Image (cartoon, helix red, strand yellow):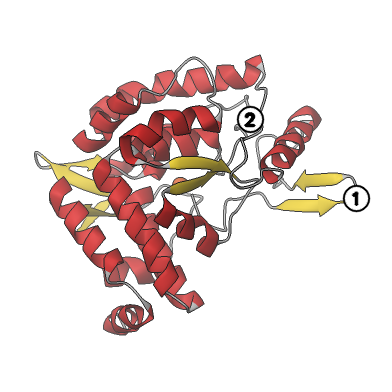
C-alpha cells in the first residue's frame, strides 16, 4: 500500500530505528512486539539494492499469524475475488504454512510476470514506491500485525503486501497496469498530479471491483487482504469507473470504503487502466482535475 495515513512512522533514534505506533494500535502496550517491530524495521532499512535480502527469522507466533490469515482468507477469495485474481493465486501458490521471505516471493512471482519484491521499513515516498513499478519491482514491508488480532491490521503488513499484492501481480494484466503506473510517475512532475494518480490507484488496485455475472468481485489488494471488508464490500455504493472523480475523491483508510468503482469486465478494466496510466502526465491531470471543478 502506498498511502501516508495508516503507516506507523519509522524514526531514527540514538540507538537505531524506532517504529512509532498509535495509542490504538493493537501492539501499542506490548513491549516485545514493539521491540520486534524496531528490529524488523532495521533489517528492512539495511537492504542495499541488488544485494540479497537479509532473512527475517520469523518466530512461531509470526508463522502462526500467517497460517491463520492464509486459511481464513482462502475460502473468501474463492467466493469474492474476481476470476483473474483467483487464477493468479493458483499460479503463484504462496506457502500457507510459513511467512515467506521476500526472496521466496520473488522466486515464485518473477517467472510469472517479472515482478520482484524488495524490502522497505515503512512508508516509501509515493514517487519511489510507484516509480519502482516501471522496473517491475515492488517495495514491501516485512513485519506482521499483532498476534492478538490476526484478522485485523491498521497498516499494511507483509500479509497485505504479499497475499494482497503478490497474488495480484502474478496476473499479466495487473502487472502491465502496474508497469504503466511506474512509467506515468516518470512523466509526472507536480505533487498534485502524483497524488491524483495515487488516488486512482487506491480506488482500483487497492479497492477496485469488477462485475462478473452481475456481481461485484474484488480485485483490490486492500479488500482482498481484509477479512472483515471481504464480508461487506458488496454492500458499498458501486459506481462505474470515473478517473476524474476517483482521482479527486478523498478517502478514509480507517473505515470500510463506502463507495467503490467497478469495471464492467476484467478485459475492460485492463484496457481502461492501462489507457489511463499510459497517457497520464501533468497535462492529463490538469484536464481531469478541471473536469470535476
Ligand atoms: Fe497496498
Residue 198 location (% of width, % of height): 42, 63
Residue 171 location (% of width, % of height): 28, 39
Q: Which mark is residue 14?
A: 1
- Neighbourhood count class around disc 2 (C-alpha, 10 Å): few under 14, some 14–19, many 20 upward: many
Residue beneath the point at 73% across and 30% down:
33
Residue 36 location (% of width, % of height): 74, 31
Viewer-nearest residue: 205 or 57:
57
- Neighbourhood count class around disc 1 (C-alpha, 10 Å): few under 14, some 14–19, many 20 upward: few
Residue beneath the point at 60% across and 36% down:
142
Residue 97 location (% of width, % of height): 49, 14
Residue beneath the point at 61% across and 46% down:
120
Q: Is mark 2 within 8 Å of ligand 1?
A: no
Element under disc 1? loop
Viewer-nearest residue: 204 or 107:
107
Look at the picture and state if 8 lies above or below 96: below
Q: In the rendered image, which residue does mark 2 sit on?
A: 146
Viewer-nearest residue: 59 or 231:
59
Q: Is residue 162 left or right of residue 51?
A: left
Q: Is residue 239 visible?
A: yes
Q: Is residue 82 visible?
A: no
Amino acid at each position: 500500500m502506498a498511502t501516508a495515513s495508516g503507516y506507523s512512522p519509522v524514526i531514527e533514534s540514538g540507538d537505531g530505528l524506532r517504529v512509532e505506533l498509535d495509542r490504538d494500535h493493537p501492539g501499542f502496550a506490548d513491549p516485545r512486539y514493539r521491540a520486534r517491530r524496531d528490529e524488523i524495521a532495521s533489517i528492512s532499512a539495511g537492504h542495499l539494492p541488488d544485494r540479497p535480502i537479509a532473512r527475517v527469522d520469523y518466530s512461531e507466533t509470526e508463522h502462526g499469524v500467517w497460517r491463520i490469515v492464509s486459511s481464513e482468507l482462502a475460502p473468501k477469495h474463492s467466493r469474492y475475488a474476481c476470476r483473474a485474481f483467483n487464477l493468479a493465486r493458483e499460479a503463484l501458490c504462496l506457502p500457507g504454512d510459513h511467512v515467506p521471505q521476500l526472496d521466496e516471493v520473488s522466486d515464485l512471482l518473477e517467472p510469472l510476470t517479472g515482478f520482484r519484491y524488495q524490502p522497505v521499513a515503512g512508508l516509501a515516498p509515493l514517487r519511489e514506491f510507484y516509480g519502482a513499478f516501471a522496473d517491475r519491482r515492488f517495495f514491501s514491508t516485512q513485519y506482521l500485525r499483532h498476534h492478538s488480532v490476526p484478522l485485523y491490521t491498521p497498516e499494511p503488513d507483509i500479509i497485505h503486501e504479499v497475499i494482497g499484492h503478490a497474488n495480484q501481480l502474478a496476473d499479466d494484466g495487473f502487472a502491465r497496469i502496474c508497469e504503466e503506473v511506474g512509467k506515468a510517475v516518470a512523466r509526472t512532475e507536480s505533487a498534485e498530479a502524483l497524488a491524483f494518480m495515487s488516488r486512482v490507484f487506491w480506488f482500483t488496485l487497492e479497492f477496485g471491483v469488477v462485475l462478473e455475472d452481475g456481481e461485484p468481485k474484488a480485485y483490490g489488494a486492500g479488500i482482498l487482504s481484509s477479512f472483515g471488508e471481504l464480508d461487506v464490500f458488496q454492500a458499498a455504493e458501486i459506481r462505474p469507473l470515473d478517473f476524474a472523480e476517483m482521482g479527486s475523491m478523498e478517502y478514509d483508510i480507517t473505515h470500510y470504503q463506502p463507495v467503490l468503482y467497478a469495471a464492467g469486465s476484467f478485459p475492460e478494466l485492463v484496457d481502461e487502466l492501462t489507457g489511463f496510466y499510459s497517457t497520464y502526465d501533468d497535462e492529463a491531470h490538469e484536464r481531469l482535475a478541471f473536469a470535476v471543478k
